[in-house]
Amino acid sequence: MSRDPCRIPDLVGYGLPGGQKHLPEHRDTVRDLNYQLKQLCRHNRDGGYATQRNRERLLSLIADQLHALGFRGMGAQSLKPKHVEALVNRWQGESLSVGTIKNRMTVLRWWAQKVNRQNVIARQNDHYGIPERVFVSTDSKARQVDGAALERIKDDHVRMSLELQQAFGLRREEAIKFQPSYADQGDHLGLKESWTKGSKAREIPVRTAAQRAVLDRAHRLAGRGSLIPAERNYRQQLRVYERHTANAGLSKLHGLRHAYAQGRYEELTGWKAPAAGGPTSRSLTREQCAIDREARLVISRELGHEREQITTVYLGR
């Protein structure tokens, strides 16, 4: 029987529900690989919406690049060391930043893990000559949104999300999906896995009267629901958020997390963060270094990171 060119390859069991253990081998063009990677993404929804969307976009780009590099007829299970090395050589030849290449390596490892081919990619990036990313911030990216700016936001739910970002250092997705009746635990917030990057639940302390006032307003607006109105889903509310903040002249709102981190650092240490004009680590005493490290660990956890090193992005070093 001739092969139907319109037939979509069967993906049951390949990172998907069902019993089949392996994808069939394919002799088609790159379209098979693009389709299979898209299906892996659709049936393995790890992380938040933005993470999923970025992963699917990068895997589509990677499939196109493999085709351009001469690797034809690949399926998702075809990934081999030679493919990884060819991609890395191409990216390095394009003079991409270390951070960009590392993000793509993370996506490649996700692909390999989902098809049980983890061993085709070296565990350490330095195997491919990818250097360590430099995380030190040399200037402050902290951002504040004042009352006048908030008044320019015409959507109540978007305005409330911005207030939460500023008060608690939340990511945008967390602040949009925020459900006060669930999160407000009195002396701390409890964030659901489904709200957070990497699907990692976490807690953030409620320390000030200003934070409590923000939460009280969020309760009054959302009731038992979230900051996504009942008639919208997350994607729709994200578009509303983007439109209203742009119309209000607001940008680089990730800087609200920087401001939270720097304020928290000063509260915990008694001096300003290096990125905010405070002393660098080289000028600290041994006792101050211990205080600095403990503060960074606290802030890293509150921001939803697992490493102290990442705080240099927000605080400097």
Image: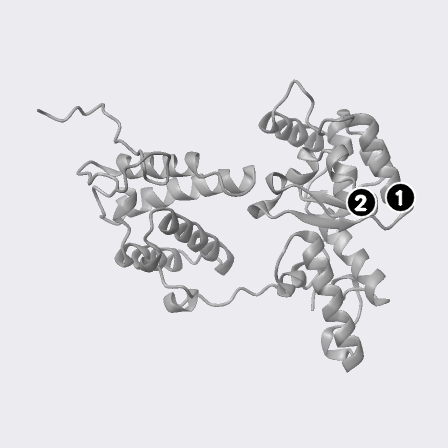
Q: Return the x and y of residue 273 as percentages of the image width and height.
A: 77, 64
Q: Is the residue 55 above or below the residue 237 in the image?
A: below
Instruction: Answer few, some or many: residues within 10 Å of disc 2's Cα (few below 14, many 20 plus, some between 14 and 19).
Output: many
Which amino acid type is shown beneath numbered disc 1?
Answer: Ala
Three-letter amino acid code of the residue under disc 2: Ala
Quarter occupied by residue 68: top left
Could you tell whether 306 is left or right of 95 in the image? right
Q: Position of residue 30 (x, y in %)?
A: 26, 38
To which residue does mark 2 refer? Answer: 167
Q: Is residue 149 above or below residue 113?
A: above
Quadrant in the picture for residue 3: top left
Q: What residue appears at the point 63 percent right and 56 percent down from the top-left corner?
A: 305
Q: Are marks 2 and 1 in contact (CB under 8 Å)?
A: yes
Q: Secondary structure at mark 1?
A: helix
Residue under circle 1?
Answer: 210
Helix, strand or loop for disc 2 = helix
201 horizontally vs 46: left or right: right
Mark 2 and mark 1: Cα distance apart in space? 8 Å
Which of disc 1 and disc 2 is earlier in sequence? 2
Q: Residues within 10 Å of mark 1 (few under 14, many from 20)?
A: few
Q: Nearer the viewer, residue 260 or 291?
A: 291
